[in-house]
Amino acid sequence: MPTVAYISHSDFGLHDTGWGHPEHVGRLRAIPRALRYDFELFERLEHREARHATADELALVHDARYVAMIQQLAEAGGARLDADTVVSPGSWAAATAGTGAVLDAVDLAFAPGGGPRRSFCAVRPPGHHALRSSGMGFCLFGHVAAGAHYARATHGAERVLIVDWDVHHGNGTQALVQDTPDIRFVSMHQWPWYPGTGPATDRGPHDSVWNVPMPAGQRREAYVAAFLSAVDSAAIGFTPDLVLISAGFDSLAGDPLGGFTLEMVDVDQLTREMVSRADQWCGGRLVSSLEGGYDPERLGEACVVHMRALTGAGWGVGGAG
Ligand SMILES: [Zn+2]
């Protein structure tokens, strides 16, 4: 029986930002293309089509008027929320499926029986910059933040840990969870860099936020060590019932929107370290959701490495990596 679900949705292709936009539909198409070269992994995954989150579910983290506005803008033919953040006619279907993917993954993590405890949600648009009443930074809805609140509201989870290794600060996730001290948030990000938030001194109003700003161009090992050290600090006296990963692969070397230096071996290690911690803390409940990553070929490969590590299969097994 598969231990890992791979959750996606054909509607993600309907979010039309244009090919000149870094967050274009080709990013997501690169994932099944890379997965085809790893047939053993493909067979090992439980492939699922996400549901669409409802307006009530989105209201766990967003102002209802903002949610309605996104739907209306999409239905009216689309608009730009800012220079980077596009609502196209298909964006309502895509963005609600993005949140729905994470909520489905949370349902799976808590489901009785022997189904997958770990999931990877291959979504777009990404989510970790979205604020309560505004989208920004390519993001419309805060998928991972919604997943954390949903786990508490629906599955009786008390403590949730969110970790974010995207090269950009997860300012939206922080804003949507920092008033709930039982949701802890760790974000490692390039500094100074977009969106300009997330200094180490910003611990949130309840000291439940660990921001790890890092300069560009450091040795790979420095990022891995700083990230894991912050994760372990966040888990002192706090055993999560669920772990969520904002898996941004723009932290890889060569990404057009970042200056970090991670390689596939680091994606493998970071994933395995989080799997091991989730096994110790919470019966393995681990939900990962795609954020950034703007070199499509590298993104596809990274998602395969990440999912292979989520299954616990050996490095390089089956082949693409
Ligand atoms: Zn990013």
Image (cartoon, helix red, strand yellow):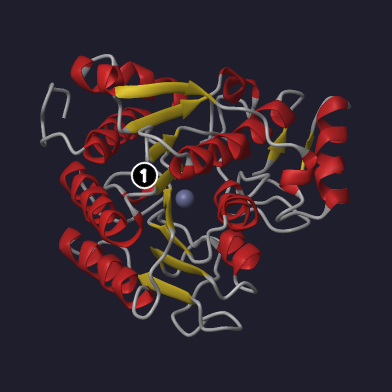
Q: Residue at the location (16% across, 62% down)?
A: 221
In the figure, is residue 199 to the left or right of 256?
right
Residue 226 to residue 207: above or below: above
Other residues around mark 1 within 10 Å, as few (<14) / some (14–19) / many (≥20): many
In the figure, is residue 220 to the left or right of 123?
left
Near-viewer residue (146 or 76): 146
Q: Quadrant of the N terminus?
A: top left
Q: Residue at the location (53% across, 35% down)?
A: 23
Q: From where the camera sits, is residue 81 visible?
A: no
Quarter of the image for residue 304 reads top left
Q: Find the residue positioned furthest to the front.
A: 113
Q: How many marks?
A: 1
Residue 198 to residue 266: above or below: below
In x, y percent, where is residue 100?
A: 61, 35
Q: Quadrant of the C terminus?
A: top left
Quarter of the image for residue 243 reads bottom left
In x, y percent, where is residue 166?
A: 41, 53
In the figure, is residue 108 to the left or right of 216?
right
Q: Residue at the location (69% across, 58% down)?
A: 131
In x, y percent, where is residue 55?
A: 79, 41
Q: Secondary structure at mark 1?
A: helix
Residue 107 to residue 173: above or below: above
In x, y percent, where is residue 256?
A: 39, 43
Near-viewer residue (250 or 160): 160
Q: From where the camera sits, is residue 234 visible?
A: yes
Q: Amino acid at mark 1?
A: Phe
Q: Residue at the location (38% across, 72% down)?
A: 212
In the figure, is residue 129 to the left or right of 208?
right
User: Under 8 Å from ligand 1: the CB of mark 1?
Assistant: no
Residue 38 to residue 302: above or below: above
Q: Which residue is mark 1?
A: 249
